[in-house]
Each structure stands twice: as structure tokens, then as C-alpha cells.
């Protein structure tokens, strides 16, 4: 263990607090222990004071002293020299509670418990869950004028009011959420407070180890520092989309899709990409939110974008850092369905989709769906970082090394250290073969200005060989014959207009039409491709009768659906997950029939063939009931509407409303029968009533007298089409059979016909006609799920234009956690208690608005 060592304390400005002194005392011991263990002769380190300011501990040349300064240190004023900086930003995790402010107010954030613990390790006191911080009181960026209010107001809308991660897709949405947790990095402009000025700290040993490894490393087109003003740098719109993709070594790249697709290494905090930093976070720090960020990006993103200046942009193209992948100009020859409809990427970033439309030569809108496919190769150097110094090649002899060194000294002296030109040329010099530089050095006279211009225009090979292409996948028409007020409704978010705006399907020229089955919107939802398709047809058709009716319907069940008039398809939108369209007709009748067996007559029927005839017929029936139920619907109509909500382009709302004129319900019960195919002939004799037309067969004994006995002598079998139901074979045997008991049981009464015994059934029939009740539902497709928000008829505005002729409009908003283990999303449809509908859970929110989550949400 290192023994104590006396030191001199010099306070440059301000007054040290007790916490400051305790901090200095605890650091000195660790400082000396590390210096002895590392066997270093000299060591100098800079630390933050807990109550603001900084102090320097140095043991150099045998002199050990501490310099303390309560003012903001110069170490935060980083030079723009293209080298790695020894700085790691602290990110806050949670939700923005207050994004609109009055004068003197600060943005309030509610932080996660993991974030609280991360901050408490740094400041060494209890951190409240709700924090009001100037650090996050960030104005809207002038690069995004759509979010800046057009009228003056006493209320300040900060960046977190509308610039939500939900405008982005894929891994970029995660990045925007994470870097939103950095806040302002210009610490001199912030209050002198440990939390306001919090930055990520590491053990001294690791800090020195990493700095020794990276202090001479040059960065590919970025500074490795978060934007000082805290502004978001990435665009999300249709004309220019920024995204993140991963190469074949799983390292991240920043993409820009406009008229061309460009890629550059994702700007990161270089020290956080190092394996030793990862090991520290995993093994010692154990911070799940930092781990989540590292596992997602491989390092902490810095939040920097492509160079905004066109001249600087092209310099990095010539340096091989910004790589042109493919052309997308054809896409930009279309119009956007809405300005925020940037390319939708999957989380890997190797696939993206977008849609646009233009009018054909007949004036009908034509929508096209485009797919972008990318194959990104890894760089030779990790994250494009270069450390090898020019002039250290073993392939050069001493004279060549001296010549090269003198040449570079002249050029670099004239070039300077800071600025875009020196940074790009010095980065190039670490990539260019030394033989080429040496060839320039052999010139008898060296003009530094000429050499600077030469190397500025020198074109390096790209640091990686990327491939990509854009193809047009689908083309379809967008047409409807009605005026906009009566058209199908699909609404897209336009924040600058503060509404979701309806698309107009009207053609530019009259007298034209088109059938449509067309993708209007394509997006990735949790890496699952979703599409919204528009359907329209002016064609009708004759619908076939749908029936299982049979010729002989006695016992059993049957149905029939029959239409009257021409049929068509009702409903104009369908999704990957929902298709509520249906065929409709002016009149649809659905009938169901059920038959039940009721058996035979209790006794057979009989009838003489005519008056005074000796012969007659004997038969029986088999009975069944028929229950018939039918519903006739007239003038049914299906209305489907779609809304893409504000602040979350990765989901849609689907509204369904079914209306109609009226319906007629009828119901009846009747008793029917089928005659048995077996029947019989009988005969008898009576001097008054039965003496004419004898039967040709009369074998019954004794011979009848006064109509008694009555002999059944002959069997007839005459099957018909549907008589199988009643056919159970002969039902009179051993003829002649005496049937006096049925036909002439009473000598005093003569019956010409009679018998029979059908079952007792109460037959009925009733019909009612009523108006059709309007029905509907509202569904939300989010997180690759279909969530039924309501089974009631949706609000009428879903089915009306926005805006309408009176200026009335409609808007729906939503938000989501994109980075973290917590799964939460909400939408501005309220329940009976007034809370927004939501899916998943987060303890940070009360389900009352579209939230802006920052950092990593692990709860």
C-alpha cells in the first residue's frame, strides 16, 4: 500500500467546500497508488469537484501538488484537430415531463432507477427521481424549422416538444432516444452543479490506459464529441433520411438517403468502442442501461451527423470516408404522401422501403413502392480510426525518411492544426501510401500552398467497399370518382399544419378512371414489413348463389345466401394484418332451414276410387317439420379509414364502420310430409254403397256383406324422387288382410274416405323489418400486434376529410420506447377515465400524452 505523501494545495479561484476537500483527499490516495503500481515517474490527472469546478493532481519532477479552480476548466474547450478526445458524455435515461416552458423554467425529466444510481455514483449524494435541468432546456434546432412555432409566444417549446424519436425508423430511432439523454455539452453555459455538468467517469487506471491508446488516433469525419448545443443532427424526412446500418463485422455506419445514398462510420465516442471499456462496464460497473447501449451500437454514439458544409462533405468523400453507394434520384422524382415519410429501415439497416406518387399522362395519381437493399463491408481499421503515423515505415531508408520528414514538416507547418482542411488532409496522410508522398517530396522546389491544394484534391480509395441498389417493387393507381368530401379517408401527419391531412384521390383531368390495388404506405414495425393498400374498383359482378340446398330437404340443416342486383367490393383499405373488406349487393338474403322427423300417420289414409265402387286405395305419409329463418339486408356499406399518427410513423390506426338501410327478418314453422311409396288396394261389397267396379283380385274369405269385411289384396310400389325419406319397405303383410277396423268399423255408418293421423304441430310465420344498426371498431397496429382499442363505432371524423371545407381537422398522436428492455407505446384514443390507450408498461408515465423518452429505458 502506498504511504501518505505531503502535497501543496493551491486554490486558483473560489472557495472549496467540505465536499470538495473530501473529494481531493480521497482522490490523492488512489492517484499515488496507481502511479506506484504503474511505475510512472510523472503523472498528471484532472478531476471534477463535487460542488463545481475542477482540480489537478500532479506529481512531476519530485514536486507533488494539487491545483484547485472553482471556475469551468479549459479541458472542455476541445480543439478541432481531428484527434480523439479524452471525454465520455453522461447520458440520462427517463422521460421528459415538461417540454414547454415559461420564462425562468427548466426542462423536467423523470429518470429511471438505474439512471439515478448511475448519477449517485458520480455525485455521491441522493438524486431525486424528478430533475429540473438547464442541461435539457434546449431550443428547437434551426435545421428543423417545421418544429419552430410560426408565431411569438411566452411559452418556449424545447427540442423535446415535437422532435420525437418516433419520426425515425430502425436503429436510428434508438439512437435519437439515446443521444437525447446527453443534453447540452457546453458546460460553461450551465449552472455550476454536479448533475448539470455530469459526465461519464472511469477509474484512473482505465482512463490512462485508454488515453495512451487513443491520444494519437485520427477520426473519420467527426469529432467524437456530442453536439455542444444538444441539438439533434439527423433528418427523418422524405427528401433526406438518416439511418444506421451495420456491416458484415456488425459495426455501425451512418447513412444518408437523398438523391444518392451515402455512408460513413457512425460517429461514436471512440473510447467507448474499446474492448477494455466494455469489460469495465460489464464486469465492474454493471449498469444495464450502458450495457444495452453498447450492445446496440458497439459504442456510445456521439450524435454527430454528416458534415453540413458541402465543401467539407466533398473533402471527406475524397478522403474515402464518406462513401457513395447508389443512386436514388428516380425516387425523388415523385411526391411525398407526407413530408415526414422518410425511408423506413429495419434494425439491421440493410433493407428500407418508401413510397411516392406522381400523375400519369391521364392525370391519375400513380404510386410506386421502392426498396433499398444495402451490403456494407467492414473497414480495414476499426470504426475507420487511424493511428499509424506517416514517416514510420520500415520500407524507407534513412535518406528517404529524412526527405519525407522535411517535406511533411513544411506542408504541415503551412497547413496548421485546426479546421476542416487540416483535419481531412492529415487523415488522408495516414491512408495514402508513403511512396506516393515521397514522390511529391522529391520535387526540387516545394511550394507548401501547391502541395496543400494537391492533397486536398487527392482522391483516396473508399475505406470500405459497400454495395447497394434501389429498385421499384410495385406500381399502382390511386383514383376515386367522388369529390374529396366523400372519398375514402387515409390521413398522414403534418406537424407544421398541426393535423393529419387527408389524401385526395381525385384525378387532375375529368372523364378518367382506374381500378386500384396499390401500396400507399410501407414501414417496418419491429423488423416486420407492414403495408397499407388502397383498393378501388368501378366494376360490379353477379354474385353466385351460395347454397347447399338439396332437391329433397326433409331432415337436416341447409343454408342459402342469395343476392339481388349487381355486387361489388366495399371497403377501400386493407393492411398486412387486417382486411375488413367484403362483397356487398343491393339486397342479400341469407336463409337457414332445419328439418326434423315427426314420423308416420297414426293410422293409414283410405279412399274408395269413386262412389259405389267396391275397390279403394290405402296409403300413409311420413311427416317432418321445416323451420325457416331468413335475413334480408338492403343497402349495406362498409367504410374503412386509416390514420398514421403524429410522432410515431411505425404504427397505424384502422377504423371500421358498417352502415345500411334496413333488414327484414322472417321466421316460419310448417308441417310437411312425403307419401310412402308403398300403397295398397282394398275391396269390399255393399248392396247400396259398394257394388260397382270390383277389384280384379278378390280372394278374401268370407265374401263381404254390408261392407264387411274389407280385404286388402294388392300392393303397389311407386317411388318418386324424394320418397326415400318415407320408404321403410312394405308395411302390410300376409294379404289378404282384414282392414274392416279402419274402413268400415260401424255397420250403420258408411265412410267414403278417412283415416290418417298427422302429428300435432303449431305452425306459424312472422316477419319484421327494422333499420340496420351501425356497427364498427377501431384497431391499432403497433409492436407487431393488432390491438382492438374499441368495439364501438369510431368517431365520425375518421371518415371525414381533414381539413374539411370549414377548416375542421383531425389529429392522432402516439409515442413509444425504442431503446431498452421496457416495452411501451400509447395512442391518443382515451378510455372512460380519460387516459390514453397503451400497450406494454412503463412506470415513468401516466398515459396522458405523447412522451419523449431519452436514454435507455430499463425498468
Image (tube, rainbow, N blue to C red):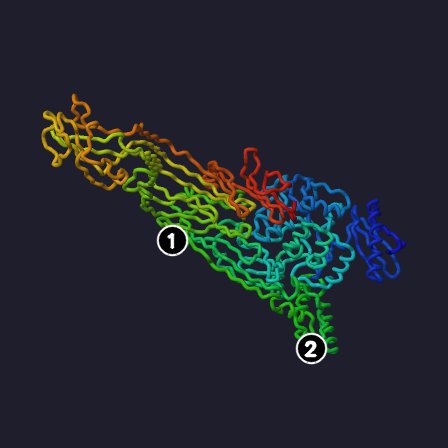
Assign a secondary structure to mark 1: loop
Residue 163 visible in the snapshot: no
Q: Is residue 45 left or right of residue 118?
A: right
- Name the residue beneath numbered marker 2: 442
- Closer to the chain start, of discs 1 and 2, is 1
Q: Which mark is residue 213?
A: none
Residue at (62%, 56%) from the top-left corner?
305
Quote the CA–CA distance across marks 1 and 2. 67 Å
Label 2: element kind: loop
Location of the C terminus by quadrant is top right
Q: Quadrant of the N terminus?
A: bottom right
Residue toward you, 74 or 820: 820
Residue furthest out toward the right? 6
> Horizontal and vertical percent for residue 343?
53, 54
Determine the image quadrant of residue 100: top right
Is 718 displayed left or right of 513 in the figure?
left
Residue 64 shown left or right of residue 109 in the figure: right
> Which residue was labeled with disc 1?
362
What crowding class fits label 1: few (fewer than 14 Cα within 10 Å), some (14-19), or many (20 or more)?
few
Q: Is residue 167 visible?
A: yes
Amino acid at each position: 500500500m502506498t504511504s501518505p505523501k505531503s502535497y501543496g494545495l493551491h486554490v486558483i479561484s473560489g472557495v472549496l467546500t467540505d465536499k470538495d476537500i473530501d473529494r481531493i483527499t480521497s482522490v490523492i490516495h488512489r492517484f499515488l497508488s496507481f502511479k506506484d503500481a504503474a511505475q510512472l515517474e510523472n503523472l498528471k490527472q484532472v478531476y471534477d469537484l463535487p460542488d463545481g469546478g475542477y482540480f489537478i493532481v500532479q506529481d512531476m519532477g519530485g514536486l507533488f501538488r494539487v491545483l484547485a479552480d472553482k471556475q469551468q476548466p479549459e479541458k472542455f474547450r476541445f480543439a478541432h484537430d481531428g484527434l480523439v478526445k479524452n471525454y465520455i458524455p453522461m447520458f440520462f435515461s427517463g422521460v421528459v415531463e415538461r417540454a414547454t416552458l415559461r420564462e425562468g423554467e427548466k426542462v423536467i425529466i423523470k429518470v429511471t432507477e438505474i439512471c439515478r444510481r448511475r448519477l449517485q455514483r458520480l455525485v455521491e449524494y441522493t438524486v431525486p427521481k424528478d430533475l429540473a435541468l438547464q442541461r435539457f432546456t434546449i431550443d428547437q434546432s434551426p435545421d428543423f424549422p417545421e418544429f419552430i412555432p410560426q408565431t411569438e409566444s411566452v411559452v418556449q417549446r424545447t427540442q423535446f416538444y415535437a422532435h420525437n424519436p418516433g419520426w425515425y425508423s430502425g436503429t436510428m430511432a434508438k439512437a435519437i432516444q439515446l443521444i437525447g439523454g446527453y443534453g447540452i455539452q457546453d458546460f460553461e453555459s450551465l449552472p455550476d452543479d454536479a448533475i448539470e455538468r455530469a459526465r461519464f467517469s472511469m477509474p484512473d487506471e482505465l482512463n490512462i490506459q485508454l488515453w495512451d491508446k487513443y491520444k494519437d488516433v485520427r477520426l473519420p469525419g467527426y469529432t467524437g464529441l456530442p453536439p455542444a448545443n444538444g441539438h439533434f443532427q439527423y433528418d427523418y424526412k422524405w427528401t433526406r433520411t438518416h439511418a444506421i446500418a451495420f456491416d458484415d463485422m456488425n459495426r455501425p455506419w451512418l447513412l444518408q438517403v437523398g438523391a444518392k445514398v451515402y455512408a460513413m462510420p457512425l460517429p461514436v465516442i471512440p473510447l467507448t468502442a474499446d474492448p477494455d471499456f466494455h469489460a469495465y462496464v460489464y464486469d465492474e460497473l454493471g449498469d444495464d442501461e450502458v450495457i444495452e447501449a453498447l450492445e446496440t451500437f458497439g459504442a456510445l454514439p456521439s450524435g454527430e451527423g454528416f458534415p453540413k458544409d458541402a465543401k467539407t462533405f466533398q473533402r471527406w468523400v475524397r478522403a474515402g470516408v464518406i462513401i457513395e453507394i447508389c443512386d436514388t434520384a428516380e425516387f425523388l422524382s415523385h411526391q411525398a404522401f407526407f413530408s415526414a415519410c422518410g425511408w423506413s429501415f429495419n434494425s439491421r439497416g440493410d433493407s428500407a422501403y418508401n413510397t411516392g406518387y406522381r400523375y400519369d399522362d391521364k392525370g391519375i395519381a400513380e404510386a410506386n413502392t421502392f426498396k433499398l437493399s444495402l451490403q456494407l463491408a467492414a473497414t480495414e481499421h476499426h470504426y475507420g480510426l487511424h493511428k499509424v503515423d506517416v514517416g514510420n515505415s520500415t520500407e524507407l531508408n534513412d535518406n528517404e525518411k529524412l526527405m519525407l520528414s522535411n517535406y511533411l514538416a513544411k506542408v504541415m507547418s503551412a497547413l496548421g492544426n485546426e479546421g476542416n482542411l487540416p483535419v481531412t488532409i492529415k487523415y488522408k496522410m495516414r491512408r495514402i501510401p508513403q511512396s506516393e508522398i515521397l514522390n511529391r517530396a522529391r520535387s526540387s522546389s516545394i511550394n507548401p500552398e501547391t502541395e496543400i491544394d494537391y492533397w486536398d484534391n487527392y482522391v483516396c480509395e473508399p475505406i470500405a467497399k459497400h454495395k447497394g441498389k434501389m429498385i421499384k417493387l410495385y406500381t399502382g393507381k390511386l383514383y376515386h370518382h367522388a369529390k374529396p368530401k366523400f372519398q375514402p379517408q387515409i390521413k398522414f401527419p403534418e406537424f407544421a399544419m398541426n393535423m393529419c391531412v387527408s389524401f385526395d384521390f381525385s384525378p387532375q383531368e375529368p372523364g378518367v378512371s382506374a381500378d386500384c390495388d396499390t401500396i400507399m404506405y410501407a414501414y417496418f414495425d419491429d423488423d416486420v414489413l407492414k403495408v397499407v393498400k388502397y383498393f378501388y374498383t368501378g366494376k360490379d359482378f353477379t354474385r353466385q348463389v351460395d347454397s347447399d340446398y338439396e332437391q329433397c330437404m326433409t331432415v337436416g340443416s341447409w343454408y342459402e345466401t342469395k343476392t339481388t342486383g349487381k355486387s361489388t367490393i366495399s371497403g377501400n383499405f386493407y393492411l398486412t394484418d387486417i382486411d375488413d373488406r367484403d362483397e356487398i349487393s343491393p339486397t342479400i338474403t341469407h336463409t337457414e332451414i332445419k328439418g326434423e322427423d315427426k314420423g308416420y300417420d297414426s293410422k293409414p289414409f283410405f279412399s274408395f276410387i269413386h262412389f259405389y265402387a267396391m275397390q279403394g286405395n290405402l296409403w300413409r305419409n311420413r311427416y317432418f317439420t321445416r323451420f325457416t329463418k331468413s335475413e334480408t339486408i338492403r343497402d349495406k356499406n362498409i367504410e374503412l379509414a386509416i390514420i398514421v399518427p403524429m410522432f410515431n410513423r411505425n404504427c397505424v390506426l384502422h377504423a371500421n364502420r358498417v352502415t345500411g338501410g334496413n333488414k327484414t327478418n322472417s321466421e316460419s314453422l310448417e308441417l310437411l310430409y312425403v307419401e310412402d311409396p308403398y300403397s295398397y288396394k282394398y275391396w269390399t261389397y255393399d248392396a247400396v254403397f259398394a257394388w260397382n267396379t270390383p277389384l280384379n283380385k278378390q280372394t278374401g274369405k268370407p265374401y263381404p256383406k254390408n261392407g264387411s269385411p274389407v280385404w286388402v289384396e294388392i300392393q303397389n310400389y311407386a317411388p318418386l324422387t324424394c320418397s326415400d325419406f318415407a320408404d321403410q319397405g312394405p308395411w302390410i303383410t300376409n294379404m289378404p288382410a282384414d282392414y274392416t277396423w279402419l274402413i268400415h268399423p260401424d255397420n250403420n255408418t258408411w265412410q267414403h274416405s278417412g283415416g290418417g293421423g298427422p302429428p300435432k304441430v303449431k305452425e306459424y310465420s312472422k316477419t319484421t323489418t327494422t333499420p340496420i344498426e351501425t356497427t364498427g371498431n377501431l384497431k391499432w397496429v403497433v409492436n407487431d400486434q393488432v390491438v382492438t382499442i374499441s368495439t364501438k363505432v369510431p368517431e365520425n371524423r375518421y371518415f371525414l376529410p381533414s381539413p374539411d371545407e370549414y377548416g375542421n381537422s383531425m389529429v392522432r398522436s402516439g409515442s413509444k420506447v425504442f431503446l431498452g428492455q421496457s416495452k411501451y407505446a400509447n395512442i391518443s384514443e382515451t378510455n372512460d377515465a380519460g387516459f390514453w390507450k397503451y400497450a406494454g408498461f412503463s412506470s415513468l408515465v401516466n398515459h396522458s400524452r405523447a412522451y419523449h423518452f431519452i436514454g435507455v429505458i430499463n425498468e
